[in-house]
Amino acid sequence: MTFIEQLRKAERDNGSLLCVGLDPEPAKFPAAMKGDASKIYDFCAAIVDATADLVIAFKPQIAYFAAHGAEAQLERLMAHMRKTAPHVPVILDAKRGDIGSTAEQYAREAFERYGADCVTLSPFMGFDSVQPYLKYHGKGAFLLCRTSNPGGDDLQNQRLAGLNGQPTLFEHIASLVQGPWNTNGQLGLVVGATYPAEIERVRQVAPTVPLLIPGVGAQGGDAVATVKAGYRAANGETTAPIVVNSSRAVIYASAGADFAQAARGAAIATRDQLRAAQSA
């Protein structure tokens, strides 16, 4: 299956739009693991096992592993997810963006070393920095479009005077991904949940591409507003998947020994919020 087919299947099988982000910070681990970077795999694997039937995807953020020299633990975690939750696609959150020859190596890292189904990318350097990832048949890539951080306004919300209609930069990126850049149908867009009006605008410009929407939970994004802005369906079928990410609010739901069970409870609550919003 292609990445988008995997997303559709996971949405159907688990009845979910929720993506659980895996951002392991040893300083926030439960007491028995607290401060111990060698326990990153154990912590994340427990979260995966507790939530695998509740999610549309998992999203490990590579910096949280690399900062602790835990790339081998990330490889082990990716293998664990493929073995125990093969029905759940994995998005490697790396936000890579570099020239073609370097992009080829980053693509190899994401898809061959780690075995990810999808990767997040920055489109700032243009299509030739994205193209090497498209050579991997069936894999996906989400391009940064309208991010959830306040500084996103510095560039993403600026108007491009040289183009017809003077679109904002984020609108132009959305139109490229809806159109000429999406040569294999495997591209999507990252749009932050903290800007529901912009989610709706991106969906207008790019009505058929999947959206990865971070920012629900600890960053303050509203789950109901997010779904209303980005989710579209026809005849009972999703016309383009949305993948709504929550990281800290799920994985750090408890600082006790019950952290995995608490994560499951938080994931159920968020999944149910999103599900209710689909029919609201």
Image: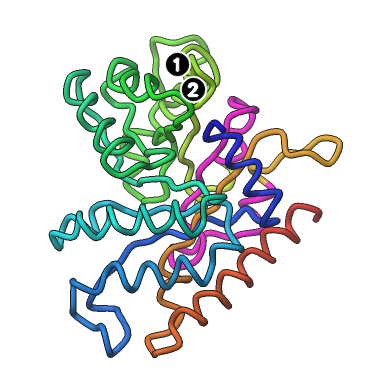
Badge 2 element: helix
Labels 2 & 1 near each other (Cβ < 8 A): yes
**Which quadrant is home to the C terminus?**
bottom right
Q: Which residue is mark 1?
A: 181
Q: Which residue is mark 2?
A: 177
Tell whether position 116 is magenta: no
- How far, Cα to Cα, is label 2 from label 1? 5 Å
Residue 107 at x, y = what percent?
28, 30
Q: Judge left or right: residue 260 versus residue 33.
A: right
Residue 101 at x, y = what percent?
17, 19
Tell whether position 221 is magenta: yes
Magenta range is 199-228
Q: Judge left or right: residue 89 versus residue 17.
A: left
Q: Is residue 93 above or below residue 258?
A: above
Q: Is residue 186 above or below residue 222?
A: above
Residue 109 at x, y = what percent?
24, 37
**Residue farthest to the right, as pictured:** 235
**Which quadrant is home to the N terminus?**
top right
Residue in the foreground of this view, choosing between 177 and 156: 177
Badge 1 element: loop
Tell me the residue at 44%/23% (across/down).
137
Quadrant of the rendered structure where residue 39 is?
Answer: bottom left
